[in-house]
Amino acid sequence: MADQTLVIAAPPLVTVPVRGGGEFPVRRIFCVGQNYVAHAQEMGYTGRDAPFYFTKPADAIVMSGAAVPYALETENLHYEMELVACIGAPAFRIAVDDALSVVYGFACGLDMTRRDLQFALRQKGRPWDLGKAFEQSAIISEIVPIAQTGPMASGAIELRVNGLTKQSSDLSRMIWSVKEMIADLSKYYHLQPGDLIYSGTPEGVGPVVPGDKIEGSVENVGTIELTILEPEA
């Protein structure tokens, strides 16, 4: 048998606490782009396109309540408030009507975005990784089991910066519902336990600066908080 001794230290396992006890191990992070009509329009699209996806690394996860430095190499850091679906069973080419059966639970999420980098990359037809998939860009609350939340087909989703409401919508306004996006994504990937799906943000996205406090909520799931610090020297 080949020597399987690790030649460098293995990265730590990323986990998210579950309401009621236990930890949910994070495998991958998928994000759905422009899943609310009004947000797609404010980004310059029609608002009725087919779903598309981008990813973030698992170690981009930051727990709600944290304080993080302003992101590197950007002058336009944006918040995006989202519902997060947490996959608890394998799914491959799953039917829409069966898709909720693989959901373990839901969480509140913030998809932090280096908007200036994203737009510059988009204009050149290049991938969005530098704008989206960076350190400390996937904020998440505790996970609430689906038995406590229900299917999350509707419910208020809101975000405030320094107490002022910036985003206010309803999950029913998503172009692609949770079960529809799971079914569609499972055509392209073998979804596995530990996968997270950030389901898109409503209109009202905007910039933050050092010193800002972000507070968000999703009805029947909970709340999320983040404080932005001065950038690293």
Image (cartoon, rainbow, N blue to C red):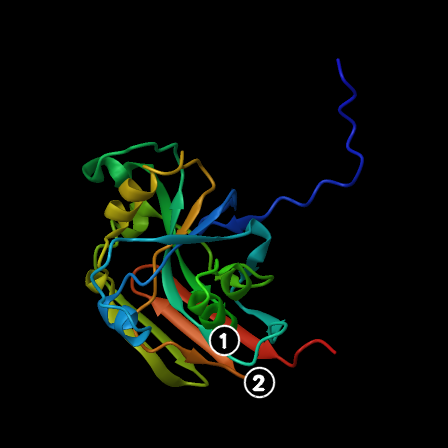
As shown in the figure, which amino acid type bears the numbered disc 1? Asp
Q: Which mark is residue 183?
A: none
Residues at badges 1 and 2 in contact (C-beta under 8 Å)? no
Does residue 46 sit above or below 181 in this rendering? Answer: below
Q: Name the residue rendered at 75%, 24% in the picture.
A: 4
**Left or right: where 225 falls relative to 7:** left
From this viewpoint, which residue is outermost toward the top?
A: 1
Answer with mark 1 or mark 2, whichever residue precedes in sequence.
1
State the residue position of label 2: 211
Q: Residues within 10 Å of mark 2 (few under 14, many from 20)?
A: some
Image quadrant of residue 202?
A: bottom left
Does residue 140 sit above or below 120 in this rendering? Answer: above
From this viewpoint, which residue is outermost toward the front?
A: 124
Which of 206 and 226 lies nearest the eye of the viewer? 206
Image quadrant of residue 93?
A: top left
Instruction: State the quadrant of the C terminus.
Output: bottom right
As shown in the figure, which amino acid type bears the numbered disc 2? Gly
Where residue 109 appears, x then y in whole percent?
A: 43, 62
- Marks 1 and 2, how far apart in space? 20 Å
Instruction: State the quadrant of the N terminus.
Output: top right
Q: Residues within 10 Å of mark 1 (few under 14, many from 20)?
A: some
Q: Name the residue rendered at 53%, 63% in the picture.
A: 137
Secondary structure beneath dot 1 equals helix
Where residue 156 appears, x then y in whole percent?
A: 26, 68
Which of 33 and 15 lies nearest the eye of the viewer? 33
Q: Name the residue rendered at 43%, 48% in the picture.
A: 196
Does residue 3 sit above or below 222 in this rendering? Answer: above
State the residue position of label 1: 116
Secondary structure beneath dot 2 equals loop
Where residue 189 appears, x then y in whole percent?
A: 40, 37
**Left or right: where 22 falls relative to 146:** right
